Amino acid sequence: MTDTRLELPENAYRELKPGESYTPVIPDEKGILEITVRSVGLGIFFGILFSAAAAYIALKLGQGIESAIPISILAIGASALFARRSTLLENINILAIGATSGILVGGSVFTMPAIYVLGLQDRSSFFQIFIVPFLGAALGVVFLIPFRRYFVADMHGRLPFPEGTAITEILMTGERGGQQAKVLVSAMGLGFLFDLVPLTFGAWRDVFTTELVRPLHVLTDRVKAVFALNTSAAVLGLGYIIGVRYASIICAGSFLAYFVLIPLVAWFGAHIPGPITEGLPPIAAMDVDAIFTNYVRYIGIGGIFMAGLISIVKMLPVMGQALTKAFAELRKIAAGGLKQESTSRVESDIPMGVVLLLTAAITVAIWVYFRFSVLADMPGATRLATLSLILTLVISFLFAAVSAWAVAMISVTPISGMTLTTLIVAAVLLAKMGLTGPAGMLATLLIGGVVCTALSMTGSLVTQFKIAYWLGGTPRRVEWSNILGSAVASITVTAMIMLFASVYGYTHSPAHPNPMPAPQANAMAAVIQSVMSSAQAPWLLYGVGAVIALIVEMLGISALAFALGMYLPIELNTPILFGALVAEYVRRRSPDEITLKARNNRGTLIASGLIAGGALAGVADGVVRMVADWRKFTIPGLDNTGPWGNWLGLGMFFLLAAFVIWDAARAKPEEGAGPEISL
């Protein structure tokens, strides 16, 4: 029977002291069910279910849905259907298989529908669309394995892993029950209702913006300086867990983008009568969002690229150790020594020799795919396929650590920005080698698809690695489960893409008068077309971002966190800082160490519940919009989307923050027995 007294160790969320080690909830010497028919079956079921739902919502609304948190909740609930409750490690395995749904949607739906947008469907097939996300996901797994210990053990307590913390608290609360379960469930319900009311019913704006504050119209219209804040409960909870340090750096990047760069671009643009970028209106005719999207965001992408290079340089010692170990294992295999060294279960990865063999197999599969499927009829197909392979491997490897680091910091990874960079670089290089037209666009798109899925996988897998590290899951089994889940999700997502292409279409035509919007795929298609036809890209803006990131790193500040701030819209970053300040306020009001730990633990549970509830609200809102032509609630005589709703949303956000402070302060001393968060 499952031990209902399981607790996270006190040092789960803080840095370890010299000589101190971390022992997971389920230690190595304690045998417990992990891979079972139940866990595999439920994982596959949830993977198919969420793959289909997430694909529809992403194509319809242009954004994915959170799958890991709902699946962790469903895994706990599903165990009530069986005579024996699922063990903690069974639930981790369900999560590892099922959560690939969100990964594959991010990698496939954002890129593969562009095949239909560009009119390349005659050159494609089910296999061709399926193999891209599957190979990308498998590549992401093998690329991250050598860095697993670095992220989860060497950086223990230094990276907040906000989503991983929320999922861990959900799984542990399912084990413990009692008062902690009540706190988590009540916070989850509050987060669900708080985010659902503005999203689905439109009772207030879910983003406060100074654009709707009339006395500030000079700043908005002339200076183009706008402050915005997402009023979501989920983002407030995210900031609470992240802490002030990283939240401040991220917000600093946003402030540079919105209060320095955008006003500068607007000021210079006001003195230029015509457009300076082909296909775009004059800067003087653009609002803040347009300037950010078409100019300043590219600076953020350049910063992310430079931060990636810096991260790779910093990790060279780790890479060297991993490669040395891998080649040593290969030499043992070549010499006939197939026995694996004794390794504790909680530190057992797929052997490095097998990782290298898998990497080699995936590499060959990608080359064969490009050579004999994508470029079969092109002159110089072998040379072009080799170049495509090199681009895929180098960029995936370069950004894998970046994606993992971003998720470990703020649970958000700039997949679209990195994929956009990949598409531009690939399109320019392939065009210079003579690969243009439909074949060139298809090759570029498929390279982007593999890279996009690989980066999505590393971002999700690093969270699963940390959850397994905290709770005692076997890393090797998490890795194989993700590969299995990738195959299932790839088949499901590909079927959905082709089904929607047939039923709805992705471009307006007589046969499809109301096509699926697929905004991300349309954006990718537009980039490929523009670069393939003119080989133009905003290199200057990329370079400016790269220099800014380098300067920030020289000042001892995390370049990646700062660049993420420049890349992400300001409304996503300001509430993160506000949530972090709420957490800091709770800690500073604690009169003694025992009270501090109790309030920290209760605050973490509340924040985790808000994140989970907000994620579920996003899923529910997507389902409502999918099945019904929903009319949002309106108050007669008041515009919920105008100034009234703007201020109401901000007021409700402040009330929620006040509730978190009040509720955390109600913690009793005995609630300080669990882990303490110190960021």
Image (cartoon, rainbow, N blue to C red):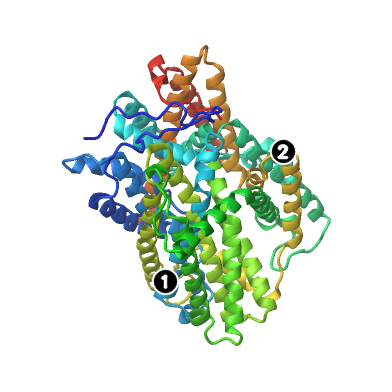
Q: Is residue 302 left or right of residue 672?
A: right
Q: Is residue 191 left or right of residue 118?
A: left
Q: Label 2 near label 1: C-beta < 8 Å?
A: no
Kindly identify which numbered label has been placed on residue 556.
2
Q: Which residue is more in the foreground, 14 or 619?
A: 14
Q: Which residue is more in the foreground, 639 or 2?
A: 2
Q: Quadrant of the N terminus?
A: top left
Residue at far right of view? 271
The residue depicted at 66 percent of the width and 55 percent of the height is 305
Label 1 neighbourhood size at 10 Å, few (<14), some (14-19), many (20+)?
Answer: some
Determine the secondary structure under disc 2: loop
Please state which amino acid type lies under the numbered disc 2.
Gly
Question: What distance separates the C-alpha of mark 1 from that of mark 2?
Answer: 49 Å
Point out the tag, 1 or 2, that comes first from the N-terminus.
1
Badge 1 is on which residue?
A: 501
**Residue 34 locus on image (x, y percent):** 29, 46
**Residue 616 locus on image (x, y percent):** 38, 43
Determine the secondary structure under disc 1: helix
**Residue 593 locus on image (x, y percent):** 50, 15
- Of badges 1 and 2, nearer the viewer stands 2
The residue depicted at 56 percent of the width and 80 percent of the height is 439
Above-or-below relation of 382 to 472: below
Please state which amino acid type lies under the numbered disc 1.
Ala
